Amino acid sequence: MSITMSRGQAYIHRLNDKRNVWLDGKRVRVTEHPAFQGTLQTIENLFDLVDDPDTRETVAYWDEHTGSYVHKAFQVPHASQDVSSRAAAFRLWSDRTYGVMSRLSDYARSRLVGWYATRQDMARHDRMYADKIEAYYQEAKRNDAFLTIVQRDPQINRSLPVGEDEDAMLRIVKTNSEGIIVRGAKMVATAAPYADDIIAYPIQRIPGHLPELAHMVIVAVGSPGLHLICRESFAAPQLDAAHPLSARYDEMDAVLFFDDVLVPWERVLLHNNPEAVWQVRCNAASSSLAYHQSIIRLHAKLEFITAVTAAIAQEIGVDSFLNVQEQLGEMISQMQTIEGLIIASEAQAQPDALGNWLPSFKYIETARNLGSRYYPRAVEILKTIAAGGLIQIPSGRFDLNETVGTLMAKYLGGVTLQAPEKIRLFQLAWDLTGSALGARHDLYERYYAGDPVRNRAGQYIQYDKESLNKKVEPWLHMK
Ligand SMILES: Cc1cc2nc3c(=O)[nH]c(=O)nc-3n(C[C@H](O)[C@H](O)[C@H](O)COP(=O)(O)OP(=O)(O)OC[C@H]3O[C@@H](n4cnc5c(N)ncnc54)[C@H](O)[C@@H]3O)c2cc1C
């Protein structure tokens, strides 16, 4: 990193590579196009917290290997305090972004830490994996890399068995002395245009007879042949106060096309190896560390939406009605349930067989699975309470015309707020729940961790049913 640049500026500087980012049908430069500037500013500020004396101890740790401060998402927890200390770092980034930015790299970095910390377990599946993940972990940490992860293949025909629509699935088309050449596509990589590297592997179990689909690769976003097809931008112009969240926090999602992309051997962590890829996909350390971050962020977002809803209820004078209080109470219960599960996951952290301290996954999984229902429910409550108030927000500047401005001041105030502040409150609520960004967030919380139906079913499938049966059995033999 140049001494004249802050950590955040150095990160932005790295994005000036040859990446193929497509937006509105055109190839664009992330560092110049207006759609990305508000979010880049947010990320730059967050990255700089590592070097800010006021926040450094919370977000960063001193790393002996690199001889520098590094974000705590890269820290391998060797004691219970490390788990809490990582949590404090996640909380600070989440609070600064109100839980509205989810893939700020701390999720993907945590997955990497889990894989790195348990690398020796993989020796029986692949001899090279441990060395490669170690080298990449050190490199990512040294470079303060912004990472994201993509697993899902495009939605073409989900009724087909794995592999039958394999044309879209990432596969090796050639190998040479430099590495492998991959072709195919991946669906929805959040934050990909902002990333240094993307970690890609399949979400589903690849059958043993289709090894050609079973790879785990780390791809530099600037790789020739990699195309990032962005969805429509939800970013509002930087100074648009009507869309305060869209102006700062559109983390962008992109479909990835791999048009014969060379992945150097050192970044081919696994190839042609269905069992090893499945082990990585199900790695307990990686899931527990990464979803620990996710539920802390979820909690920040539930707190925020509850705060906005309560402010609206008070400001339109409905918070004394029993039904409104009941709904606000439900939001608080949701928020505190997730908080309680975070506390439980940290209080019951345990070392694994390799000495890595992991927050208890059963509580994390429960919080994650509740979150896919809690957040949409919170949005529903906000809309139920705010009602048509979300639509009576005037467009544009209301103070420019004297006549209309006076009438607005007279008719659009609230219980305590004057019209301008009350309008700001409703603009915030609309941006959180009704704007394109808000709609995306509702969908994100339902699906970011995969299919919520199968996630919840998975909790039942993996649960120790024997312990449940024991509760019922004595009653079956009662005379
Ligand atoms: C905004 C957003 C951002 C995301 N970001 C990322 C990211 O950065 N990285 C990443 O890896 N993932 C990300 N995801 C998650 C991922 O892209 C998928 O959305 C998720 O894995 C669910 O798969 P799907 O959308 O293909 O749904 P599908 O699997 O196609 O499911 C569609 C519907 O059909 C049902 N269904 C499908 N198959 C079955 C079956 N076999 N049995 C029963 N029911 C079935 C599902 O329950 C669902 O209702 C993101 C998702 C969203 C919405």
Image: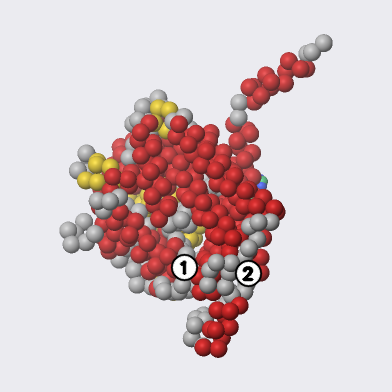
Q: Secondary structure at mark 2?
A: helix
- Looking at the image, residue 292 sits to the left or right of residue 77; the answer is right
Q: CA distance from mark 2 to mark 1?
A: 18 Å
Q: Where does residue 356 sit, x and y in percent of width and height?
A: 37, 30
Position above or below: 139 against 352? below
Label 2–label 1 contact, CB within 8 A:
no
Q: Which residue is under mark 2?
A: 389
The amino acid pointed to by label 2 is Gly
The outermost residue toward the front is 416
| Count of numbered circles in the view | 2
Q: Where does residue 35 sit, x and y in percent of width and height?
A: 42, 71
| Label 2 environment density (alpha carbons within 10 Å; few <14, some 14–19, many ≥20) | some
The amino acid pointed to by label 1 is Pro
Position above or below: 371 against 379? above
Badge nearest the viewer, 2 or 1: 2
* Residue at (52% x, 81% y) in the render: 398
Closer to the camera, 412 or 1? Answer: 412
Q: Is residue 392 visible?
A: yes
Q: Which residue is under mark 1?
A: 244
* Residue at (33% x, 31% y) in the render: 78
**Where is the C terminus found, in terms of image quarters?**
top right
* Residue at (27% x, 62% y) in the render: 9
Q: Where does residue 36 sit, x and y in percent of width and height?
A: 40, 68
Upstream in sequence: badge 2 or badge 1: 1
Closer to the camera, 138 or 3? Answer: 3
**Where is the N terminus found, in terms of image quarters?**
bottom left
